[in-house]
Amino acid sequence: MDKAQLELVRGTLDVLILKALAWGRLHGYAITNLILRQSDEALLVEEGTLYPALWRLENKGLVESEWGLSENNRKAKFYWLTSEGRRHLRQETKTWEAYAAAVGKVLSATRPPLPEEG
Amino acid sequence: MKRTPFWRRYARLLRPDVRADVDDELRFHLAAKVDELVAQGVRPDVARREAERQFGEVSAVQAEGERLGHNRERSKQRKDYWGGLLQDLRYALRTLRRDRAFTSITVVILALGIAANTAVFSVVDTVLLRPLPFPDSAQLTRFESGRELNANIREAAGLSGLTYTVGMYEEFQRHNQSFRQVTSYNPFYGNGEFTLTGQGEPQAVLGLMIAGNFFQTLGVQPMLGRLFTKEESLKGGRAATLLSYAFWQRQFAGDPNIVGQAILLNKTPFVVVGVMPPSFDFGSVFSPGLRIDLYVPAYMDVLRNWGNTLAIIGRLKPGVSVAQAQAEADILFPELKAAHKEWWGDYSSTITGLKEYVTGKLRRSLIVLWCAVGVILLIVGVNLSNLLLARAAARSKEFAMRMALGAGRSRLIRQLLTESLVLALGGALLGLALAFAITIYLSHQGSIALPLLSSIRLDGAALAWTILIAVVTAVLFGFAPALRMSTGNLQDALKDAGPGMSAGRRHERMRAALVISEVALACILLVGAGLLLRSFLRVLDVDLGFQPSHAAVIKVDYDDGGKRERRGAILREMLRNIDAIPGIEASGVADMLPLGRNRSWGFQAKGKQYPKDMALGALVRIVTPGYLAAMGMHLLVGRDFNWQDVAGRENAVIINQASARRFFPGEDPVGRLALVDDDTDTRVIGVIADVREHSLEFSAQPEMYLPAAQADPEGAELVIRTKLAPEALASSVMQTLRSLNPSQPAAEFRPLQQIVDHAVSPRRFFVMLVASFALLGLVLASLGIYGVISYSVTRQTQEIGIRMALGATAFQVQRGVIARALRLALAGVTLGTIGSFAAAKWIASLLFGTRPTDPATFAGIVVLLCAVALFAGYLPARRASRIDPMIALRTN
């Protein structure tokens, strides 16, 4: 793990989990793996934060769960998105994109803003 | 994700286990990580340590997981519960809609029971439970004097024995420490009779003479205008009056401009200073059935010389109890008497809370009524149980099926309870509508002499009561059938080709027990109602001492200027003209009629010594010649008055038997001299048979009758005896009266019977209610018998078919079925009779001339119940006897 790992920005964990589940039913370990791989190993969701976040999402009715069997025939809890969760994901994605674009604009600026007319 | 093997699905079958779920999930995560590391070539034990290290603090995550998990479980249960309830409700409504006959019968029965309960509750609530409609009404008390007299004598003295002189009233007002305010009114309502003129036809109006602080003491404010000023309450002040709301509406069409104007009462202008609010109805609290039109100040300086004229009401100081006030009065009254040698009595008084005074006598009757409707509710509930059981039996397959499909027992019970709740609430809704109609009806029964009746209404308390009894009935009586249903043997029920197995028989035993208790309860109600009805008939049978039928009364007015000579002439002329009207058999005038107002004067035989503690007084009526005949009273010895008994001639008096017995024991009173009122020598000229004075239920009291030309009457009531309908004579009588006195007020003929009816109206009211409840009970019980017998015939169709095929006749079959019905009825009647004895003893004080063990009533009820059972059994019996053996054997 010598690659530079990024701290998760507050509030982004939920949307990352929802996005991971948008690909299908997954158990907790698979969610971590998926996020890790898709972020090119940049985002490691720790167990201590992943599970409480998942359970909270479940209580909010954004995801549902059921016991099932993993690839290694182990009993695992699988999660999937509810329609409410899907809607939430779409909305959060938009918000994030807008946010990221705005932050990007500010940070990539090369000139101070023009003085305002007034 | 692989498909889960079926046995894995049931890992949390019994109940969710949040902690295990969290543990399992975290354990899987570790295992998955270890697997991965091992796959990368790490040694398993190293891999395990590495995974655990990476995971960090597990326990915090675990705790968080449990907390969240529990939250989730709770909200899920809640959702399941409400979802289930909604489902139950929808299902109940659907099945009930399908079974329309059952639903409507059940709802109607429940509605009847609930309506009776709600209506009676609102009566009980208004009369017994709710405080009087005055602010801080618990502080209000009523005084009754004459405590030193024994009950008999006090009765004889009538209202005069319970009231006070102005002097006494003022002295008590001045010296007492217990009361914030003491006020009074004149309960001799005849003193306030006025003729209103100048407003269309002359009108007879009834005014109440009140002390200046009367409304202030009660805490009632006028709706318009103001109360009397001090000057207006004094003799010689400007004549003023306050209108009652009803009179203001009736006479002045609710015109607010009447305040400040003068109206003519007995040709004297009285300024209307205000209008009382609709919530204040003097009659409904103090004298049920009395309609007071207006209030006038009682001029104490005038009443001062009239003897006992005031009824006293006091408002206690805060924190002072009735008992403390009584203790003070016990000391104060004798002290006052000692200071005033001229007083007639010491006015030792009984002080009661006003509420107790107004409604105390009714408590027993109302509680009996309440119990009666309670029994009705029990019968209704048992009936509900019975109907639900019958229905459940028909649905046993449905339930077996649902159980087989996995419905839990508690879920089934809940389903059945939901159904009975829906039924009960439907019944409550309909019952409320019924009760609403009943209370409206009752509140408009001005002729029933019950206090506060006009303020009866359905309020929040009644609503809450209705919902309470509906829910309790549903749960209590829906539970047994639900329990029974849900315990049925699954396979039996599914296989059961027809009812006839052991479950059916057990079922029937339970229903039989229900019917027996229903009959027993109905029996108790019927016996109670029967005893009360018999008492009522006995009351109606009482020899009144006058003939109420074929006689009518009208209030008359004449102007004699207070002179006896003129009065005699005027009345003689009036009666001569009245008698000349075709169809009138007899006529006469009296100032007060029996069963109404009364007053008493001193009376004793001249020159006779009486025991010291004997009250020397009798009720007094001032009458004209012909009155006794018009009333149909029986003159036993001597003669009636004639027009020669006038002022200046020898004073004459006619007494009743009770007077003769008391004042002339063992002698013939006719021709003897008596001392009347203020010791006037008066000749006894006749004795009449006793007349019921106070009520039909108390024995007659000493009375005297004095001629109107020799004594001063208080008002005048013209009594005519005629075979014609009084209305037919009304116009010619009124014409005659108007021709003699143009200001004769418009008044209607009241049949004399109405006065008697009014006197018995409370008893009639209770009897009617209890009897209708008993009838309802009887109908429900017979429905119960019918239901059970009918069901058993259906169940035994096959058996009956076999018996008939083997040669049983239709008669034998019928006899068997009817015998079963009779057995049920007899068991119920036996239990009921035992209960009835206890109930009858309890209501003994409400009976009149009827013993609580009255054999005729008991026998009658037993026969009645058996007859009804016979009929209820006959219908299914006839059906049984028509069973075609061939068809019966083929079916099923």
Image (cartoon, coloured by chain):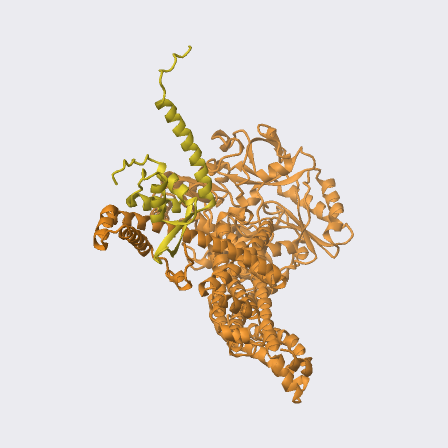
Residue that appears at 38% across and 12% down = A115
Q: Where is B646 relative to B886, above or below?
A: above
Point out the residue furthest to the front here: B41
**In which quadrant of the rendered view does residue B138 lie?**
top left
**In which quadrant of the rendered view does residue B3 lie?**
bottom left
Left of B436 or right of it: where is B349? left
Q: Where is A115 relative to B495, above or below?
A: above
Number of marks: 0
Between B766 and B89, the one lying in front of the other is B89
Left of A10 or right of it: where is B217? right
Between B623 and B267, the one lying in front of the other is B267
Residue B210 at x, y percent in the picture: 50, 39
Residue B4 at x, y percent in the picture: 41, 59
Q: Which chain is yellow?
A: A
Residue B226 at x, y percent in the picture: 51, 31
Q: Where is B812 relative to B486, above or below?
A: below
Point out the residue furthest to the bottom here: B807
Image quadrant occupied by the N terminus of chain B: bottom left
Left of B566 or right of it: where is B310? left
Q: Is residue B370 visible?
A: yes
Residue that appears at 55% across and 59% down = B92
Between B265 and B73, the one lying in front of the other is B73
Q: Colour of chain B?
A: orange
Image quadrant occupied by the C terminus of chain B: bottom right
